[in-house]
Amino acid sequence: MGNSAYPPANAAEPSILFQDQRFVVLNKPAGLAVHAGSAGGPSVEDWFPLLSRRKDGPWLAHRLDTDTAGCLVVALRKAALLAAQAEFASGRARKTYWALVRGQPVGDHGTIDAPLIRRSTREGWHIAVDPNGQRASTDWRVMGRGRDTTWLELRPRTGRTHQIRVHCAAMGFPILGDDRYGGGSGALHLLARAIDLPLMPPLSALAEPPPHMRRALTACGWACETIGLATENDRKIS
């Protein structure tokens, strides 16, 4: 749970993208942690009492970085949690991200295969590409190009910490706003765009881009104002 029984009045509020008796998929705002951790502060878990009052839940089914916006799966029951975790662990869960990156990738699509390892320094920790690290693979394709930025769709085949951020940086196109991996200052331009779990019945959700990403997306050719008005590129995702 978070630090209080109710969400803080000044905290960014997640919205609901999908809900049934098993799960809720939240549209997590950028800047909101999924759990408070040792440092405390507002988190997604502050909203758990409003999602369910059952004793066996809710639980986070997976994680998103604090600065990443978009689809976050919350299990309302223990059986649902175990089912979702099995989908993530097996690689059957289909996760789609959108990112705005600096520069122009060569080609229109590809796969980044680069093992990742966690390194600690006096300044803190970070993730780096290292042949001795854990296997990590990300598929990417160009959705649109601007003058100095590119709009990418990314689908991670593995689920390593900071995987998409490090893979993009390692290929020479860091994500805008990713000051840890070379993308400069400002808000992180990374969205967990869609999540699909092939359960029975299936779970599927789609998140609208947050306000801070829309100008850069528009510069790269995005013309969708709401989820209900899908662009040609959006239709290619499904």
Image (cartoon, rainbow, N blue to C red):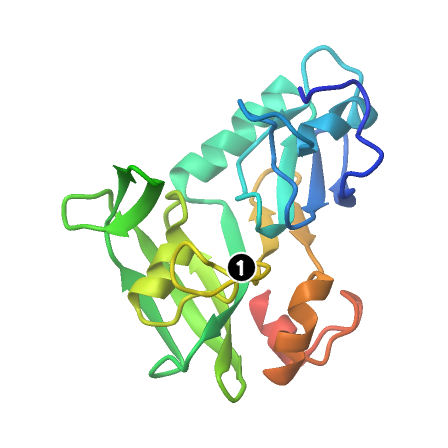
Residue at 70 percent across and 25 percent down: it is 76
Residue 87 in sight in this render? yes
Residue at 58 percent across and 73 percent down: it is 236
Q: Is residue 13 above or below residue 49?
A: below
Q: Is residue 70 above or below residue 25?
A: below
Residue 202 in sight in this render? no
Residue 189, quarter of picture: bottom right
Quadrant into which the C terminus falls: bottom right
Residue 208 x %, y %: 71, 61
Front residue of 77 and 165: 165
Residue 30 in the figure: left or right of residue 95: right
Residue 149 in the figure: left or right of residue 230: left
Q: Which residue is mark 1?
A: 97
Residue furthest top in the image: 55
Residue at 38 percent across and 58 percent down: it is 181
Q: Is residue 176 above or below residue 121?
A: below
Residue at 70 percent across and 29 percent down: it is 22
Residue 196 x %, y %: 58, 49
Residue furthest left in the image: 132
Q: Look at the numbered disc 1 and give the secondary structure of its residue.
A: strand
Residue 20 x %, y %: 77, 35
